[in-house]
Amino acid sequence: MAATPRPILDMNAYRGGAGDDPLLARRLANFGAASVLFYDRPIQMVRGRGAWMEAADGTRYLDCYNNVLSVGHCHPRVVAAMAAQTAEINVNSRYLHATVETYLERLKALLPPDLSNVLLCCSGSEANDLAMRVAMKATGRRGFIVTEAAYHGNTLAVTEISPSSWRRGDRPAHARLVPAPGRSAYGDDVAGGFAAAVTAAAAALAADGFGLAGFICDSIFSSDGVHADPPGFLRPAVAAARAAGGIYIADEVQPGFGRTGAGMWGFARHGVRPDVVTMGKPMGNGYPVAGMATRPDLLARFCEDTGYFNTFGANPVAAAAGLAVLDAIEDEGMIANAATRGAQIRAGLDALAARDARIAEVRGAGLFLGVEMAGPDAPALVRRLIDGLRARRVLIGAAGRYGETLKIRPPLSLSDDEAGFFLDALAAVLTAMPLTPA
Amino acid sequence: MAATPRPILDMNAYRGGAGDDPLLARRLANFGAASVLFYDRPIQMVRGRGAWMEAADGTRYLDCYNNVLSVGHCHPRVVAAMAAQTAEINVNSRYLHATVETYLERLKALLPPDLSNVLLCCSGSEANDLAMRVAMKATGRRGFIVTEAAYHGNTLAVTEISPSSWRRGDRPAHARLVPAPGRSAYGDDVAGGFAAAVTAAAAALAADGFGLAGFICDSIFSSDGVHADPPGFLRPAVAAARAAGGIYIADEVQPGFGRTGAGMWGFARHGVRPDVVTMGKPMGNGYPVAGMATRPDLLARFCEDTGYFNTFGANPVAAAAGLAVLDAIEDEGMIANAATRGAQIRAGLDALAARDARIAEVRGAGLFLGVEMAGPDAPALVRRLIDGLRARRVLIGAAGRYGETLKIRPPLSLSDDEAGFFLDALAAVLTAMPLTPA
């Protein structure tokens, strides 16, 4: 299999040259080796509206990738709330501000009631870094169980449990990997197989002297290639982690805030109760805000050793943006829309799969969908599909351990016509693309 | 000495009850053990303008503490830039946006020319976490030298090198502490003593098998109690760290962006050239943005193992806010103003010190000033001064290993009258405060 050792479109540095693009040349000079870019010829964006982004050359692209601007680019309500609060006051949480508490209470009302302490920070990485520390303090142990192509963030500690970021062979010994919960790894008994893998990983961590601090997973398994079904498959794995003395951290940075079309959080689809929930990306629809919710006893234990204060974290602008996002989700029926549009796209993808052997499997929930391509050339096929869709003005990305899966995440505000536009574009690209040997 | 083991007003949890304040009760229920608040009766803020914040009860406070809103609360230029860009597009840096590159180039023009790669992230914590990883990869070592009461951020890795956050005795073995560069530790030869301490710490790290990856310091030594003089004292310490094979990380999260009144960066006062510069707090005047600048060779080495991508980091709203801050600093002469107003306050503090034996030393540069109180009751005295100043509508904080130093950081836009208001208030509080036994 012509596999690259990890997903190809996420953490990879840009390998091309600047060509005749002066803005790209500036980017490469500024970011250096850390230039992470989409496409061989990256796109200069100038304007966003709803599900669309407009490039400098006037081309309008349907954004089926960006799960940050989740209620739509430049949602008027979020833009207005941020602008108004920024003009009024932006101050750190060592002072009190009513909007911050109102937001935290809105969040808490959406979470399991025992997770009644919520801290705000700036990024999902900070949230997961904090969650790891809570888990280590709660258990007195250092080991974590993650899926094989997991991505949980970019701090030193979180990178150590994010295999999709590892460029070389060396894997931290305290991070034990389990295959993602798909049929390819576990056959028909995904729930049982995944739980058995967690049990074995916990035993290995115990044998290595680390012990199990926490089992952390993104309940939609985004970077692993999107694994959603059957709902409930997570429950035995969580039970296995708890039986081994670890806590369960639900990383909702990607599936959270209604994306799965089945409630606010991805873990709810599985009927599990996390000890810690982390959240980020869509939380402020672009404003840098993230959070961690946990039980007061776990937070109090953590605070015995160090406190936690985040200068920007719980500022009233973040809270105002977060409140506007929740308002938009609720008032505009976005969770129901994610379910409806998700089902529409899913049906279209299933129809494509039925007549195209290059599609191995269609997966997902709501507006978080994955299309795994078949055969040894799947990663190359995915790259060509992504480029072909770009030419037809649709933006999507890749997922999976080898980048073998199309990752589709349009805004929750997607319309019927926009869903159709995506499906038509994908069908046209598949038709135009020469068959590759399976 | 009635010393508490660490600074009292920074990372400490709030120890009081909610009393009859319903908003405080909500905060304590929401943040739990991680409730970090100023004052026994925290202030509810509702509005910020320039150097002033207005509380819910209508009281207006002169903000002499907040070094985030550094060009002034709700600076019209920054507010307008953020609002306009948020309404236009906010997208991650995998696409190109001209404003991002323009901002990075403006930053680079202010930095030493060899630090030509600049990455943006969300917080000073993320910037320092990344800097540590660059240092470890560059050297193949794990040890860091920091000052005794240093604070560099709140991730797992950064907390391990932030002694001011440690609540218990256990100190990570790879973090070696050196006393802050003041007369109390090193007498008249601060430069020589500090360098010798760095050399000894590096030798200890080598002996312990960690080796020296990096020497990281905030060039104004904020949490250590503010140590600024004589300019240049850092140079031998940096040379000592380099002689031991470590790199030098200048943490400019606090002194950067003109605060010292002597150029854009605190390290420039010392005539040193960092290998890595980190920046944060005032960078977006409240918008969550931070950054790390380094040499392309160091970044390329780091990127061999993992890439670096930050979802919110280099978005065009962060860049627009950052540009507006640089414009405000430059067009409104804020560095010169920091020097002038800093000298005015310094002269007033020196005059107070000359007639009040309770003041041990006045230190600082520009609008970053420290007033160390004398004797065993200094921490208690500092707490009473902070409360007394609050009653006179001035907000300041504490610094130093035991909270024995007043920390004074008004906005760079401070006026003559506002500087006078602060000095009058401090003089009145000192006069009204009963003398305590020395």
Image (cartoon, coloured by chain):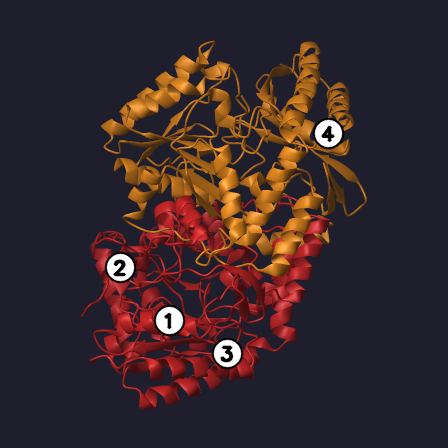
Chain colours: A red, B orange
Left or right, B151 with reference to A47: left
Q: Quadrant of the N terminus of chain A?
A: bottom left
Q: Where is mark 2, residue-wise?
A: A176
State whether discs 3 and 1 lie on one chain. Answer: yes
Callout in the foreground (3, 2): 3
Q: How far apart in space, not on screen, are marks 3 and 1 (Cα)?
A: 28 Å
Number of the label disc, if any, that sits on residue A386: 1
Q: Residue at x 26, y 34 (%)?
A: B210
Number of the label disc, if any, that sits on residue A262: 3
> Looking at numbered disc 1 in the image, what kind of residue is underneath it?
Ile
Residue A308 in sight in this render: no
Residue most extreme to the front: A20
> Looking at numbered disc 2 in the image, what kind of residue is underneath it?
Arg
Dots 3 and 2: beta carbons under 8 Å?
no
> Looking at numbered disc 3 in the image, what kind of residue is underneath it?
Ala
Q: Residue at x 70, y 19 (%)?
A: B344
Mark 3 crowdedness (10 Å alpha carbons): few <14, some 14-19, many ≥20: some
Q: Earlier in the sequence, mark 3 or mark 1?
A: 3
Callout in the foreground (3, 1): 1
Left or right, B349 with reference to A218: right
Q: How far apart in space, not on screen, are marks 2 and 4 (Cα)?
A: 54 Å
Q: Secondary structure at mark 4?
A: helix
Subunit ID for the residue under disc 3: A
Subunit ID for the residue under disc 1: A
Dots 3 and 4: beta carbons under 8 Å?
no
**Residue A222 placement (x, y as % from top left):** 38, 68
Number of the label disc, if any, that sits on residue B388: 4
